[in-house]
Amino acid sequence: MWLERIELTNYRNYKELSTDFSAKLNIFIGQNAQGKTNVIEAIYFLALTRSHRTRFDKELINFDEKSFTISGLVHRTSGKLPLDITLTDKGRVCKLNHLKQNKLSDYIGKMTVVLFAPEDLQLIKGSPNLRRKFMDIDLGQIKPLYLSDLSNYNHVLKQRNSYLKSTDKVDTVFLSVLDDQLADYGSRVIQHRLDFVDQLTIEADKNHYAISNQLEHISLAYQSSIKFTDLSTLKDNFVKQLESNHQRDIFKRNTSIGPHRDDLTFAINGISADFCSQGQHRSLILSLKMAEIELFKQQTGDYPILLLDDVMSELDNKRQMKLLEGIKENVQTFITTTSLDHLKGLPEDLKIFHVENGTIKTD
């Protein structure tokens, strides 16, 4: 899979932009705040209908404008596919092959991306929300059913929390109805995540073992807030634990257990990664990113597009080399950087873009 072209209208500091890319390596060079990351963000938005930098869509619209449009032409094994997203104050309109898509699950996954940005280095020690988001983004791209199950779960969760907040006299019969719906969708979300973590661990461990010169193994573990010993009893246990927490949830006016409270942990040679060095953290995250690429290929039949946003300067020469060696020849890659000086081992087949104040020039 690769992105042949992108066109931006009123996106961030780009009033108008149309540019073609190399199917292999694309490097954006420029000083900070010139628009390098905006291009990476636009590609990410085109794939996932959201930004990796902000929750507020209006920040993406060029100053004094009321909407933006991103268009792209992606090559898949099944052929070329035009993608378009327009954002206005009324919301998003997403199109595949110029046809409007009513469900996000029908759009997301048609162009898959793996992003490696400096904030990913906080994945290990950051908040559980970061790790849940990591799972949600990957699973949402490779498994459309996950997006549907997660959306339904979040809808019932919002309904349950709103009910707990809106009344002083809770009808436990109605609450039990919500419990059953929440446990139904929630148990599906957990099963999707468990499968994903198992598969990702296999690929990530292979990479980390190589990066660490055959000295370290890594493992990932999904930490569910629902206690269960067998997947066949997961939903029943979920319902029972929701019921046993009724008094707590009524008092706190929120839902205390479920996938929205779950976490992901990492270990190196059986020791929690929380206690490992910063260098080991970098190797672990690098291993994860390389594993995501392989897992996407296994699940979808296409390699994803790799976005490296200002991350090469965070890696020493050894890890840079491992990353560049680990990128398969047919993985289209985008790199943002302020200079080529610190980049080692770059292939000859690349395209360089010079970015300055919202304009792009190629060599």
Image: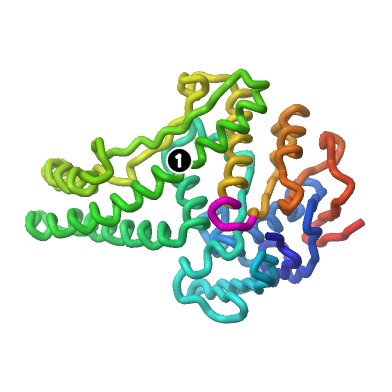
Left or right, residue 152 beside residue 12? left
In the depicted structure, whether residue 190 falls above or below residue 76 = above
- Residue 122 lies left or right of residue 302; in this view the side is left
- Looking at the picture, how far across and down is residue 164, in whole percent? 18, 54
What stretch of residues is rendered in magenta?
Answer: 297-302
Quadrant where the N terminus is found in the figure: bottom right
Q: How is the image coloured?
A: rainbow
The residue at 72%/46% (across/down) is 328
Secondary-structure class at tag 1: helix
The residue at which mark 1 appears reads as 197
In the picture provided, is 83 more to the left or to the right than 186?
Answer: right
Q: Quadrant of residue 261?
A: top left
Crowding at dot 1, Cα within 10 Å, few <14 / some 14-19 / many 20+, comes out as: some
Residue projecting furthest to the bottom? 99
Mostly what secondary structure, the magenta segment? helix
**Quick check: is 301 in the magenta stretch?**
yes
- Work out which residue is located at the far right of the displayed protein and give it: 363
Return the x and y of residue 11 as percentages of the image width and height.
67, 66
Residue at image position (80%, 65%) is 20
Across and down, in percent, residue 52 comes to 57, 52
Q: Looking at the picture, tell me which residue is in the foreground, 36 or 235.
A: 235
Residue 188 among those drawn in magenta:
no
Query: Which corner quadrant holds the C terminus?
Result: bottom right
* Up/down of 350 relative to 323, above or below: below
Q: Quadrant of residue 279?
A: top right
Name which residue lies at 72% across and 67% down: 6
Q: Residue at x 80, y 50 (%)?
A: 27
In front here: 32 or 259? 259
Q: Position of residue 186 (x, y in %)?
A: 29, 52
Q: What amino acid does circle 1 point to?
A: Val
Q: Nearer the viewer, residue 320 or 204?
A: 204
